[in-house]
Amino acid sequence: MNSSQLTPIPDAATPWLLNAAKHLGVAPQQARDFARSGELQLPGLTLQLSLWQTEPFAQWIVLAQLPRPETLTPLQWNELLLRANCAISAMSACTGALDERGHGLLVKRLGFQAYSDHPGLAAELDHLIAVAESLVAGATALTSGTARAETTPGPAPASNPVTAPAAKAAMDQHWHRPLLIQAMQQLGITAPPEAQIQTVGMIQLGARSFEVIADGDQRHLLVSTIIEAPLRSAAQRELALRANLQLMLLSGCAVALAPHGSCLQARWDCKGLDGEAFADWLLDVARLADSFVAPSPAALPKRNPAWT
C-alpha cells in the first residue's frame, strides 16, 4: 500500500486509532505507529486506515492486503473473492477487490463514528481481520489434501432449540415497514398493507428487480440486483474486482458472483434518513446496475415500479 498517496492522520483522530489498537491487544509501540500512520502490520496481514473524505462528514476506509495462496491460480483466487462477496458485502460495507497491481484487497467503508468511540473502531477492525483470515484459510483449504479427500456424509444436524427463537426473530423484522411504505409512495407504488411487508421482499423498477432484506440490527437494508455482466473468463473477473475498489469507495456497492449469476449488492444505512432517501438511492443503484450493459431502446422508466 502506498501510504504517500493517503491523507495524513488528523491530530484529533490519533487517540482514536491508538486506543482502538490497544483494545485489539496490539503492542504499545505498534499501537503508536498505527496512530501516526494508519498502517497496522499483523502476522500475514497489513491493514491501512485512511481518511478518504472530510465532507459532509469524515469518511474513513480500511484496506486489508490479501496475499493469494501460492497453491491457488489467479483465476481461482479471483473467483473465490467474487463468490465470497455475496456474504462479505451482506455483513458490512466491505468487498473483495484488486488494486492497480492486481493484488487482493478487502475494502471497508466505516460508518460514521465519533473519535471517542475507540471500541467501535476496534470492533470494525477485528471484523475485517476475521474476514481476511477466513478468506485466506478457506483458499488454502481448497487446494489441500484434506479438502479434496472424500468424506462420508454424517447425519443432518438436529435443530437447536436454543437458537430457534433467534432465527425466528431474524426472519420476523418489522422496523423497516414504515420506511419501505414511504419509499414506495415516493416511487409511485401503491403500498400493500403493512403486515404484508416481510423481512425479505422484491421491488420491481421497470425491467429490474431488487431483493430487499431487512437486517436484524434495525438499521440496514441489504439490496441486491442481477447485472448482465458475465464473469466467466479471467479478464472479466479481474475487471470486476478492480471495479469493486472504486464501487465501494464511491457508492458502497460491490459486484458479487452469486449462484444465480452476477449481481450488484449493497447495504443501505438508514440512520438519520427516511424512505424518500431510500427511494432516490435505489434509483441511483438501478442506473448504476444498468451501466453494466450496453444501452438498449428499452430504457429504465424513472417512475414505473411495483412491489411484490
Image (cartoon, grey):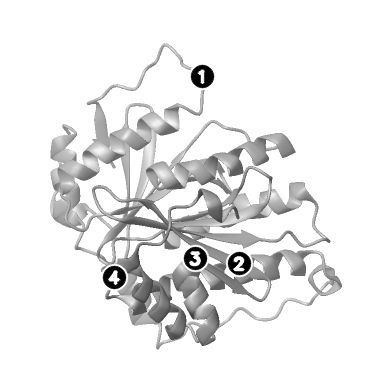
In the rendered image, which residue does mark 2 sit on?
A: 46
* Among the 4 quarters of the image, the one containing residue 297: top left
Q: Secondary structure at mark 2?
A: strand
Residue neighbourhood size for the residue with mark 2, other residues' Cα within 10 Å, grouped as few (<14), some (14–19), many (≥20) = some
Could you say where residue 266 lies in the image, as x and y percent from the top left? 40, 49
* Amino acid type, residue under disc 4 in the picture: Tyr
Could you tell me how far apart the alpha carbons at marks 2 and 4 are, in whole angstroms?
A: 22 Å
Could you tell me how far apart the alpha carbons at marks 3 and 2 are, in whole angstroms?
A: 12 Å
Q: Which mark is residue 115?
A: 4
Front residue of 33 and 154: 33
Could you tell me how far apart the alpha carbons at marks 1 and 2 are, in whole angstroms?
A: 38 Å
- Nearest to N terminus: mark 3 or mark 1: 3
In the rendered image, which residue does mark 1 sit on?
A: 294
Q: In the drawing, does residue 99 fall left or right of residue 13?
A: right
Q: Residue at x 23, y 48 (%)?
A: 56
Front residue of 196 and 13: 13
Q: Residue at x 48, y 78 (%)?
A: 32
* Amino acid type, residue under disc 3 in the picture: Ser
Q: Secondary structure at mark 3?
A: helix
